[in-house]
Image: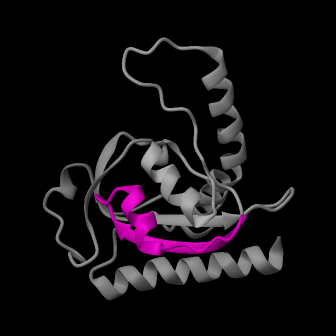
């Protein structure tokens, strides 16, 4: 999930928190922004929002795989559901060697004809990942974490992000 310090044409000239932030592209919003990305690994709960187990901030331009490698998550023997950014054989091999199978949607190759089997698999994986997307939506709604346009320093950005995450975790723990 992106945390935006500046967006659109202002992202080119932004210089706030240059130690941790830079320019990235948000595919879901189809726009460039200046800021950081929030990554989460969460524990699934029945009929409730997932409980964040690991949270990590990375530069906006950093690939999701590189950010996950920085975490070195020791997840034990559980399934890890990721998006299409992790859908390559090398990534799955690395996680399988750690004892954590990685499940991703099917990533169709160029000019490959569409078939129903991969589409059904992708729909299944997306349905399992949907609660995490709901968690991100809930975070945005409750804390407005994505809007960091008034932040003016690196420390301010970290206080903004981690402060709002602490409040969100408290809300999740005591009011859900």
Above or below, 106 against 159 in this view is: above
Q: How many marks?
A: 0
Give the left or right position of residue 166, taking residue 162 as reference: right
Pinpoint residue 158: horizontal percent, then vertical percent: 40, 82
**Residues rendered magenta in the picture:** 50-77
Determine if residue 147 is in view: no
Pinpoint residue 9: horizontal percent, then vertical percent: 19, 50
Nearer to us in this view, 17 or 125: 125
Residue positioned most to the left? 13
Nearer to us in this view, 81 or 74: 74
Give the image quarter of residue 43: bottom right
**Which quadrant would the C terminus be assigned to in this image?**
bottom right
Say how the picture is coloured: one colour
Above or below, 7 against 89 in this view is: below
Residue at screen point 36% across, 39% down: 30
Residue at screen point 72% across, 46% down: 128
Pinpoint residue 168: horizontal percent, then vertical percent: 65, 75
Residue positioned most to the front? 97
Report if residue 60 lies within the magenta region. Answer: yes
Pinpoint residue 55: horizontal percent, then vertical percent: 54, 73
Residue at screen point 43% across, 85% down: 159
Report if residue 147 lies within the magenta region. Answer: no
């Amino acid at each position: 999930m992106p945390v935006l310090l500046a967006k659109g044409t202002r992202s080119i000239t932004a210089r706030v928190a240059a130690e941790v932030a830079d320019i990235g592209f948000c595919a879901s919003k189809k726009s460039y922004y200046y800021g950081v990305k929030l990554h989460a690994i969460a524990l699934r709960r029945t009929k409730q929002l997932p409980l964040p187990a690991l949270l990590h901030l990375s530069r906006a331009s950093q690939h999701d795989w590189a950010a996950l490698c920085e975490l070195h998550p020791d997840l034990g023997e559980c399934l890890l559901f990721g998006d299409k950014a992790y859908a390559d054989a090398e990534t799955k091999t690395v996680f399988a060697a750690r004892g954590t199978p990685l499940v991703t949607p099917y990533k169709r190759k160029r000019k490959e004809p569409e078939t129903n089997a991969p589409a059904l698999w992708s729909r299944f994986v997306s349905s399992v990942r949907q609660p995490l997307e709901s968690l991100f939506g809930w975070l945005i709604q409750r804390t407005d974490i994505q809007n960091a346009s008034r932040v003016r320093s690196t420390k301010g950005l970290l206080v903004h992000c981690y402060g709002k995450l602490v409040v969100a975790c408290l809300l999740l723990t005591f009011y859900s």
